[in-house]
Image (cartoon, rainbow, N blue to C red):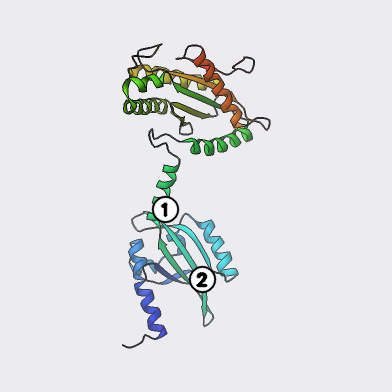
Amino acid sequence: MLALNESELSQKIFEFSNDGIFILLLDENRIIDVNPSATKMLGYSRDELLTMRISDIHPKEMDLLEEFANQVLAKGAGWSNELTCKTKNGELLFVEVSASMITIDDQKYLISMVRNISCRKQIEAQLRMFSFTDGLTGLANRRKLDEYMDIEWRRAMRNELPISIIMIDIDYFKLFNDTYGHLEGDSCLKAVANVIQNSLVRPGDLCARYGGEEFIVLLPNTDKDGALHITNKIEKTLASERIENINSDINSYVTVSMGVACIVPNSKVTSSQLIFKADRALYKAKGEGRNKTICFLDSENYY
């Protein structure tokens, strides 16, 4: 068996690599060669790619390309990052790019290895979604609530805007489970979750399952009146669903109790205190007979 010389080996690697390989002549900022994997990845022919510039392939990341220029061109260092590539049909691929510069006969060339990581990114996005989602209802979970609350709290503090919280509890849910069984209980939780979610119209509003039969709604840039408007929608929509609960002491259909709290955040209060106030208002609503909404007022006793 004849051994490949160094030049032949390099050519074989170039031709058969699963990663796209781009060779650029830096002084002219143009692509001078690509391997078959690069043409397959982007959908362009080799001749088409040889007429294009890097900015044509990475149109959304000019800031990262400037970083690349500073690091590779100015310092002669290697560079790697995750970018997007635009294919011939307009699709954006997530790619991992590793680039380094070589000099041959005073000419500077850039060797860029490009790997398609779109499938990996899709899986990562799905895993992230699952980690922030309640498995039964499809609502956000406590982890997502905590993250989103932190973001919105800081934004409200900067802009001196109100935030409202609604705590929601299904009335006599244990009796519902005892009467109809846990499968029907799960169906009830999902139905109530849908009612709450569908009562929110702004993309910035968040509904999360807080635990058991409790839900929480986070309403950025919303005062008390705006929050009460949402609770009214929830009450009316849930009543129209007519989910039977024959052993409830207050109604033959499923109802909820709600507690509302609102604040313009400042350095002296925390988001946990706002949630605590909404929870105290909910506690009072349940203590006063359930199937009602109570708004927290600092002047009243909720214990």
Residue at 45% x, 56% y: name it: 59
- Frontmost residue, 163 versus 59: 163
Q: Nearer the viewer, mark 2 or mark 1?
A: 1
Residue 134: where, in percent of width, then height? 42, 36
Q: Is residue 162 visible?
A: no
Depth check: give the residue in front, 295 or 114. Answer: 295
| Place of residue 127 in the rendered image (x, y in percent of width and height, measured from the top left) | 42, 47
Alpha-carbon neighbours of circle 2 within 10 Å: few (<14), some, or many (≥20)? Answer: some
Compared with 14, 4 (above or below) is: below
Residue 198 or residue 269, whichever sits in front: 269
Note whether residue 121 is visible: yes
Question: For mark 2, what is the residue?
Answer: 100
The amino acid marked with disc number 1 is Lys
Q: Earlier in the sequence, mark 2 or mark 1?
A: 2
- Secondary structure state at the residue bearing disc 1: helix
Front one among 241 and 98: 241
| Residue labelled with disc 1 | 121
- Vertical arrangement, residue 111 with respect to residue 181, above or below: below
Drawn side of residue 21 relative to residue 279, left or right: left
Q: Residue furthest right?
A: 268
